[in-house]
Structure formats: structure tokens, C-alpha cells
Image: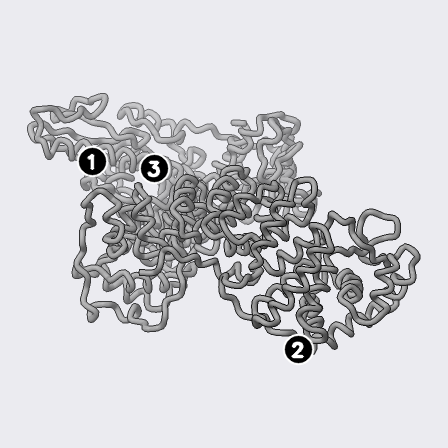
Amino acid sequence: MRNEDLLVLPSSWLPGLYPRRGGVAVPAPFPTKDAVKKLERLVAAKAGNLTGSLAHPETDPDLRAAAQGVASPLGAAVVAAKVLRHVAGTRVDTTVIADAWIAAHGLVFAAVAAAELVGLRVGEPGARWLRPNEPIVRRLPAEDTNLEWLPILGRVRAHLVAANDEDHAAVRDVLATVRTAHGLPARAVTSFLMPECKDWVDEDIATCTARTAGHSVGLVMFALGDAEQLSRFTVSPWRTQLLASDGALATVMDGVGTALAPVLGELLGSLLPYHTEERERIATALAALPDDDAFRTLIAHAEQPQVRLALLDAGQRFPVRAIRLLDDELFEAYATGYPEALELARPHLGTDWAPARVPECDPGEIPAPLLVHSPLPELPGWADAAILPRVRLSTGRALPIDTTRRLVVLLLGSRAGKPPAGLDEVVAACDRASLAAFGWALFQRWQSIGMPTSGTWAMLGLAWIGDDDVVRRLTPLIKVWPGSGGHHRSVAGLSVLTGLGTDVALIHLNDVAEKVKFAGLASSARSMLHAVAGRLGLTGEQLADRLVPDLGLRADGGLVLDYGPRRFVVGFDDQLRPTVADEDGKRLKSLPKPGARDDATLGPAAYQRFSALKKDVRTLAGDQIRRFERAMVTGRRWTAPEFATFIVGHPLVSHLARRLVWSFGAAADGSTVDGSFRVAEDGSYAGVDDDTLPLPGGALVGVAHPLRLAAATRWADVFADYELLQPFPQLGRETYALTPQEAKATQLDTFDGRVVPSGRVLGLERSGWSRATPQDNGHQPWIERPLPDGLRAYVRLKPGFTIGRPGDDPEQTLSALVVSRGRIGYRRNAADEVQLGAVDEVALSELLRDLHQL
């Protein structure tokens, strides 16, 4: 077990840390090679400007004399100020200045020069504000400090930490004289450079007030060394400076340790929602502090994703503390995953709770890809395998936790469409249900911390270790993420469904393609479906036929619910809504709940089975009805064997098939019809005269469109006689045709100038229309619909839509209907426009029907 009372600062924060003697160990500063020559070159580059600065009458005489005379700390500071202003905003490493001072004159000289430097500024003569190209170097007011030069001070401080005792004492003696000769700003510099001089820091804390501190407060903050000093340091601005950078916070944590926890807690509670960077910085600091109050603060704010992430990191770092202080599901997770920590925490729990133990597998049973002997990389706390469900092998015994950590490392390599090398061997050896539970729990941990992009692998890995239950849980999230800026995350989620590739996964992928309201996501889902269909040698529609589940129905499309003494028969109405009848065939309003006389096991199970059926059918019914209506409009055709297997032979789809009129013929697009029929209750095919109608060999079957159904009126009488309600308008469907004059025109003015609600125009997208590709500023000035033979119909709109904000305008004014064979743009291209009479009669009728219904 690691020491839970040890403060370990985040490694990424250490480069910005201002070290101190006795503090966090950091590498000693490595002097810049040829530092003196590099500084001389920098000075030479600004020699003319420097000469002008010194000659200017507003330059302080003592600064001029110091810079032109024998080398002195003040003169070096004046020169450095000009150099620093010259290289501001460049990539020049300014620490070369401190290294050059030390190399040329020693540490004492450098410390005094640094103290002088922060009292200088470069600016325009007579002006208040600094300008980089102005020549004047002047002293700051006595109460002010220039923290622009703080990196130079930090470099000198780092050299002082590494100095031997003799050099360190020499610097202290000289800086002591600086303190007696100057005010708070200079004294604050000395405390910053030597924070181990506690009496100096105490004196500066007592002197700091909101009126006198100025920028010196930052220097004193970086010198704080214990809880007592922190308690007396009450100048308000310092808390703002504390959060300025990772290095600033790390420096104060190094000085005062866990005493900073209450301050961080107050700051965390005061942040506004948009303070994301500050929130993350505070939470990371609290997670590093070995302190109960810090941990409790994380628990109290754990509903915030950034804090949740830090809490999980803290739990991984301090499992005993986590077990003592947590009281939610995370308690059991840590108590189960860290048994040694549980025993250490047990005296504080007041309970003898013990986790269920799972026998672990023998080393020889571990899959080869997990038998890697290289050191484990550091994993984030949210991906800690110890707090995730155990993964079992097919033998029932669990992988050791350290081995499971290697599984997490393996999943780190997950990419869309590409499983990590060796993972398939691991999956083959594991119990799939436990592996899926592990993967989903890992995903939920990632979800709980705000789903940062760096952790997307946790979701992508579900494509290889998930199951159908994961599909059912993930798909609702995929559908809503784009609404909160998560389009790319949703597309990654679709790749999980594709990667799993089960019937259930593909059904849900198809559901996204058909029903999701976000056009970009629906397009991605369709593309993935087409890719899957292509691998199987099918069209997208043929794949969709094969993905309709039978929901456990009997071959005749029915279902018997057995309550023991009573039985009920389930059927379906014209909208595929489940219906219930008793054993005598009497229709019931709803399925009765099991009573006292019903079988205690069969009754509740049957009732739950019906509840699940209603939910599943509710999802499927609309999809299948829309598919059949689209097939009628587009002229889609099935081969006779396909029709018999996937339509008539399907226990659920057959209910819809019996409520439609079908046509057959040899044309693949349904443009010619040889005959029509309906599907009888026994699955046979009946003509309009109710005679059995065998399909001729090679016949192609489709949903009959009334424009191509000669016996439409007679079929309407047949359906009325049999009391067959249709799932969508077919026999009674409105049809439209052009006049001879309209057929010769290239535009139809019927709808020109018509004002309609924007919502109705958007509703056309359900019928195959789409908004224009976004133009300048995201403007979408027309709607369009694809037609047979590569044609496109479009109607321009005023004012049109704006991508991402379709509801900005409540109404749209339509223009004329135009059909084009080319690309549609802002301006009409007459050369691409075709006569309306060239459009397929069914496609044209449906086009006009859509517009009339507006």
C-alpha cells in the first residue's frame, strides 16, 4: 500500500513550480550553455535602442549611471529590462539572463540583480502604459512590483535551492541588507527568493494590506511555508493569483500542504459554470492533497464532471480514505477492488461488511495477450480496473485485478473499425456477459467525468467487448448527443454498433438512420448501413428486411400468454399495435393483471412479456410502416422468394402485408404491372376476385401504387368487405397529374407565393425532402427532393433556414416548383431544367401531394 499521508503533486505541474528547500524534489537547474555569450548577443541586438534609452532626459540618472558604469546588479537589471522587453512574445528562453548573471558574477550578484529588476519598467516618456518599442527605462513607484520578470526570479530561486550552504548563507546576508534598505516590494522579492527564511515571510505577511500590497502579494504568496502563515495571509487578491496557473497552485501546495484544502473548497464553491479551467485546476489539487477535508470537498461537488474525474483519481491514490469517506456505490467498488485498504479502513467503518469474493483464475489460464511483463502505464482514476466489475473467464473464474488493468491498457488502443491487436483472443477466452458488464461500467465512468475526447477509447472498446444489452443502452445516448454538441461522439458510437455487428446492433443502427432528427447523424448511420450491406452483397433495403426481429412470435404471427388457469391471445391491428383477446376470441381493452387465482410464476412472467412486447413493437411498427410506404412511392421490388421469406413469412411484418395490395410484374422499378393481389390470412395470394393467384416465375413484387393499379376501386370494395384497415393511405391515396400545358413547362407556379409554417416545411424531411446544402453564413434557401433518373425537384424559400437554427423564422414563402438534372445553386440554371412531364408519374404525384399537404 502506498503512503496515503504523502503529498505527490501532479507531474505535469512540476515544470511551473517555484521550488523551495525541503520541498518537492525537482531536478537542479541545468545552466544554459554559453549563457554569457547568448546574453551579449541579445544586448548587441538592442545596443542602439539601449543607448537611446540611457541618453533620454527622462531616464533616471542613477539608472543611466548604473548601466554605463562598472558591472553592478542594478546596471545588469537595467540592461535586462530592455532585453526582456525586446524579446517579449518570442520563443527566446529568458532564463539565460539569470544563468549569465550567475556564470559571470555569482549567485549573490544574480539575487540582487533580480531584486532590482522587478522594480523597473520600460515605457513611453510621460505615459502610464508600457510599450515594447519605447526607449525609456524607469523605476516603478515604491509600492509597486513588476511581475513580468517573475521567470527570472524563479530561475534564481531554483539556483538558490540547489546552492551549497556557504553560497546560500552569503546570499541571505546580502538580501538581509536589501530588506533593511527598501520597502515591501523589495522585501517581498527577498521572501520569494528565500522562502525558507520564515521570519522574513512573517514580517511581509504582517505588512501586506489590500492598500499597500499591490503586486507584491503574489511574491509573498509564493513564499508561504506553513498553515500558520496561510491563516494570517488574508489579503484578498492572492486567491485570484493562486489559480493563475498550475505552477502557481503547485508552489503554494508545496509550501502549506493540506492547510490549503479549506481555501480550495471555498474557491470551488464560488466558481461560476463557465470557470471550467479553474474548476479543473482546483479539483486536481484537492485530489492530490492527502487530507480528509479535501476528499470530502470532492465528494460534495462530485456532480460536476471535472470534480468527478478528480474524485476517482483521488480514490485510486488514497483507497483507504475512499473506503472510509464514501457512502455510495463507489464505496463498494473501492472496498471490493482494494481488499488490503478495506482491512486498514475497517476500524473506522463500524460495520463488518465484506464484498462477495470471486475465485481467481490460475496464471496458466490468463490469455496470452495479457501476459505482458512490461511496467503498466499510469491509468486515470476513472479507468481503475479495481473499481470495475470483475471479468470472468469462460471457466467462471475471474481475472486478477492487475491482469484486468492490462486489459484496460489493451483497450486504450481501440479505434473505430479496428480492434486492438490480441483483443480477439482475450474475448474468446472470457465470459461475454461479464466482459460486456466490465466494458459498460468503464464507459459509464468515462461518461461520469464529462466524456473527454481523450477517453473516447472507453466507448470504442465496446465494439469488441460489448453485447446486445450494451447496444440497447448506448443507442438512446447516440441519438441525443448531437443536441449538445456531441455529433462526433455519436458517430463514434455508431461505429460501436457497426463493430458489434449483431442483428440487434444493426437493427438499432437502422433505427438511427431512419428516425433520428439530426440529419448529419442519420446520414452517417445510412453510410455505415450501406457499408455493412455491401460486405454482405445486399442493398440497404435488403439488409433492413433481414434485420426485423420476430420478437418471439409464433409463425402465424400470434402469441399466447399463459397465466395458468387463463390464457390470452395477442394479435395486431392496422398500426401493429398489440391487441388482446381471451380464449373465446373476445377482444379485451387491455391485458388484465395477474390475480390471486393465476399461477404465481406464469402470470407475472406473461404480463411482463406483454409489456416488453409493446415497447419493442412501438419501436418497430413505425419503421416498418414507413418502409412499406416508401417502397410504394419509390417502386421498390422484391423477388418472389424474398417476398415469401421476409414479408409473408415474417410473424410480425406479415400483419402489415395482409392489409396492403401488392402488384407484380417484370419491371424492376414497378413501371409496368402484370397483376395485383393481397395476402390472405393463411399466407396465400388472392386476386381481386378472391381466387388464389400463383405468382409467375421471375415475378417482382411491390406495394401497388394507386396510379398503377387498374382495379383500385374494386380493391377498395374488397378491403371494405373484409374490414381491413390500411396502415397508411394506399387505395384512398390522393393522386395528382399535370395538365398538358403544365407538362411542357419547366416550372409549376401552383405553389408560388404560398405562405406556410416553417414547421410544416421541415416536416417534408420525413417524406424524403431535404434542406439545401448550407450556403454562405449557413443559409439554406431551398428544399429539394431526389427523383428517378437522376433528377431533383426543388422549391426556393423566403427567408429560408439557417443551419443549426431552423426555427428562427416562423413562416416560409414558397416559390415555383422546378426540376433540374444538374446541381442546384443560388441562381437558376435554365440549361439544366427539364420539362415537368419528363418526371415519372408516380414520383410527380407524390411530389405534388407533399406540397399540397403543406
Dot 3 lies on which element? helix
Three-letter code for the amino acid on which mark 3 is drawn: Thr
Residue 314 rendering spot, x and y as whole percentages: 39, 52
Q: Which mark is residue 619?
A: 3
Residue 83 rendering spot, x and y as whole percentages: 78, 65
Question: Could you say which is closer to the camera, residue 212 or residue 165?
Answer: 165
Three-letter code for the amino acid on which mark 1 is drawn: Arg
Q: CA distance from mark 1 to mark 2?
A: 78 Å
In contact (CB < 8 Å): disc 1 and disc 2: no
Q: Which residue is mark 1?
A: 609
Three-letter code for the amino acid on which mark 2 is drawn: Lys
Q: Residue at x 11, y 34 (%)?
A: 602
Mark found first going from the N terminus, 1 or 2: 2
Q: Which mark is residue 33?
A: 2
* Residue 806 horizontal side relative to residue 64, left or right: left
Q: Residue at x 39, y 29 (%)?
A: 731
Q: From this view, report whether residue 583 is shown above or below residue 334.
A: above
| Figure quadrant of the C terminus | top right
Q: Nearer the viewer, mark 1 or mark 2?
A: 2
Q: Residue at x 83, y 67 (%)?
A: 46
Q: Is residue 539 visible?
A: no
